[in-house]
């Protein structure tokens, strides 16, 4: 019996129904080639009031069908529309979170290493409109201007995470590597997994010369986003894991 | 130097700036007395474009000032407004997440135990309007109707978490104990930390007699919320930790 | 100045010093080919009492050097020994945790899907002895014998995680796919990400016919491990995410 | 039918069987009064080879029985022995993790705030011996000596977590407030949730005057523990959330 297709008498539409915490191999298409990762997927559709249920297994079948395809934001958008069709749904969400690595060269020695970034795509269709959000969380260094100013020497500093979520525009696609730079260029200093002694001196002094409150950091990221025509709507979240407290300071700017 | 009060020249307002992941003792005022817990707080204010920074230490000072006061939604709303004043801010958010315990009697033996619930209050002021959201995440049992129907015996079932977030209305306050019931009454069965053998039989049979898809569960919670005049806007999220898969099924209904 | 190589006057050896929470791309060599994943690494060495510090950047450099090499337990063991040499250390630990996928066919329809498993290797050298531990956490289904016996119909069941850690023996290597089977064969039923209706009936009935307490499950895994000559020492942890409670039941058997 | 008491024919003893992730209100008896918190409990017993199962509900019943009693390490030890008796077990473990707050005065202004600490007790009985471990994880500040030495100005610093686990000795009980000091006194600087400007200057300069590698920090904690007669066996773990990397540096010293 196809219970899920029966009529429902409660007259209540469901905004989102689907699967969550689905892990599946992911091939990320970057501008420099394909990067394999592990995706954690959230997939849902809207369900009209008269329909009893959705077909949960189709979400996983859809993942299996696309297993070999490398994804960028454009391809994921197409696949998302195919998912809605497969589920006979007009509205729904495709979301995938994954770890991405960007190769970087240390500032003095030039030694290469791979910085890990938490990335995410969210594709959502509502009322005939489909939007794609592309997010990347970038670890950087922040150094406190107040601490520098009032102290005879030194200044407290710490790791910060700058999460930049932008609306991805099909005609002006923004690569993750560029999106990351909005955060790194705005920080007291960018960071690297692998640093030689001369690099460590560079990062230390660079941060000291370039103090930023959490308010400065979020504003400087926003200024850079405002100046870039590839960016539509955005949401920026900066979190400083304060080294003089056991809690975080944070700030958010969004443009709608 | 009061750097934070200087003028900022970037002409960018900040929607949210404050502190996050602040742990602080919490006294929860329930209808049956004061229940101590540990709160994890998020506190922020909006910062006008021309202002350089906020005063982060005032958030923690505000927590210390209120340390002895037991809070319910009404009291927290007042304290939130005092926080905005202390920060000289017109807009902002006070959020606290905590573990709450509700005493329950097992269905047959009557033996008492305390069910742990994850609760949350979010008080937000924007443009002169202050809203209070009260959330509780309730563990329940769900049993699959399809599995029951197609199988000669048995039916797969699992733990589910029903997260009910409602807009709290000052003139018709909803206690957590009542808010929890919307979830428990809608599930295949409610659950208890402590069950005797006769209770376990009751829960097993009750769930088997009462199968629910994730769609049924979220709709039945919504029906109950719609019928209760103490409830304004709401958001219900049901997640089934499927026992036949390694991922979750989930559904969301919200009323705006 | 090479501060780390200076003499330390505190006369205190350090058992473990190194890096933690390092994410790096991982190529897993399985018996059916190379599977890309993302590794989270913990790397440390023992530091003699007279030595002031270790060279932290060498751990990351070691990861970069091996970036192109697919790893199985044997290869990781060799690379671990190279790491100790690079750090001029006699003792130390190489640990990497990652998500692995195993292709499975549904029991009736034969439809294929990929089950996600949390895997881990730990290679440790102490006093001239090097041991390799290989771990895999397998999601399965457990059904309660007591609930079945006392109830007129139905039985509570839930997702369980069976974590099987075995000492890997160079001359009798155990593939992850075989290690996973110890857990799956011992459960009330194994599970799949993708099931057709006929498969769901099969899993439901199979679990009902095959009830297991957490004690049964851990013992049945241990029995199977005892009977397999590829297995040396082991540690088995079974956790049932009880569907009638908000807490877990668990059991552990280890053989030293 | 009391299935759990039947004979088991698999001839396999179970080292640990019980419940995990049980949340329950906790009253912590400190030297300055009773502090309420929320405990997350792990409770298990050893099961002889011939016994089929344990009585899971007794663990939760045991928690309910002790709900009103404030606990310190000595009282928990007694209660643990009562738990073993209730379960008819010779061996087993009682473990509880909780958040504790310690009042501190800022170094210059003297303003008071409460630092949150993650604490834990583990009571274990094996072969007639009962040991009690008392653990506290303390957030502090560490500043890198190398960065200070090579840089013309500034030095990178970050939040660190020092986890000190000591064997609690009945005749020389160590309060959490003293145990915390081993970590704070060894760090580049201790930290506070609430700091005035003069305090922030103090912390910044104090850390700059007092640089420590992760190796220094763990050794200095160990030196202090070695010099205190209230401390038996111990395990110290220091983790630096490096502000120039996206990973942590860490070090461990233990005394058996």
Image (spheres, coloured by chain):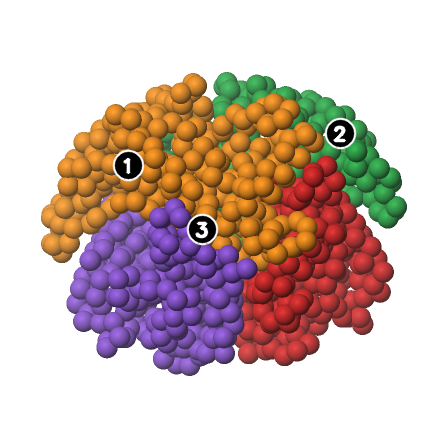
Chain colours: A purple, B orange, C red, D green
**Residue at 79% from the left image edge and 49% from the top image edge:** C219
Between A196 and A120, the one lying in front of the other is A120
Residue linked to disc 3: B215
> Which chain's residue wears label 3?
B
**Residue at 75% from the left image edge and 29% from the top image edge:** D87
> Which chain's residue wears label 1?
B
Quadrant of the rendered image containing residue D219: top right
Q: Dot 1 lies on which element?
A: loop
Q: Dot 2 lies on which element?
A: loop
Q: Are the residues at dot 2 and dot 3 in contact (C-beta closer than 8 Å)?
A: no
Q: Is D225 displayed left or right of A47 in the figure?
A: right
Residue linked to disc 2: D87
User: From this viewpoint, is residue D93 visible?
Assistant: no
Graded by Cα atoms within 10 Å as few (under 14), some (14 to 19) or many (20 or more), the crowding at tag 3 reads: many
Graded by Cα atoms within 10 Å as few (under 14), some (14 to 19) or many (20 or more), the crowding at tag 2 reads: many
Badge 1 or badge 3: first in the primary sequence: 3
Graded by Cα atoms within 10 Å as few (under 14), some (14 to 19) or many (20 or more), the crowding at tag 1 reads: some
Q: Position of residue D93 (x, y in %)?
A: 70, 35
> Could you confirm whether marks 1 and 3 are on the same chain?
yes
Q: Is B61 displayed left or right of C188 in the figure?
A: left
> Which chain's residue wears label 2?
D
Quadrant of the rendered image containing residue C98: bottom right
Q: Dot 3 lies on which element?
A: helix
Between B242 and A68, the one lying in front of the other is B242
Give the number of the disc on residue B232.
1
Q: Is residue B94 above or below residue B241?
A: above
Q: Is residue D133 above or below residue A152?
A: above
Front of the two marks 2 and 3? 3
């Amino acid at each position: 019996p196809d219970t899920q297709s029966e009529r429902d008498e409660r007259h209540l539409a469901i905004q989102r129904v689907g699967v969550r915490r689905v892990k599946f191999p992911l091939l990320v298409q970057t501008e420099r080639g394909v990067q394999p990762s592990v995706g954690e997927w959230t997939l849902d559709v809207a369900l009209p009031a008269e329909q009893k249920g959705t077909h949960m297994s189709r979400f996983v079948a859809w993942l299996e069908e696309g297993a070999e395809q490398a994804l960028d934001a454009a391809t994921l958008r197409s696949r998302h529309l195919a998912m809605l069709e497969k589920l006979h749904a007009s509205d729904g969400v495709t979301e995938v979170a994954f770890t991405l690595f960007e190769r970087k060269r240390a500032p003095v020695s030039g030694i290469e290493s791979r910085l890990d970034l938490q990335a995410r795509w969210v594709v959502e269709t509502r009322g005939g409109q489909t939007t794609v959000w592309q997010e990347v969380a970038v670890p950087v260094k922040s150094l406190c201007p107040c601490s520098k100013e009032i102290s005879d020497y030194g200044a407290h500093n710490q790791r910060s995470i700058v999460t930049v979520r932008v609306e991805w525009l099909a005609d002006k696609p923004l690569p993750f590597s560029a999106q990351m730079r909005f955060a790194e260029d705005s920080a007291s200093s960018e960071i690297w997994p692998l640093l030689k002694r001369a690099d460590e001196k560079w990062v230390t002094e660079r941060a000291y010369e370039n103090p930023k409150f959490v308010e400065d950091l979020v504003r400087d990221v926003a200024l850079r986003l405002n100046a870039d025509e590839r960016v539509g709507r955005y949401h920026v979240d900066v979190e400083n894991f304060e080294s003089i407290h056991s809690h975080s300071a944070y700030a958010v700017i969004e443009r709608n």
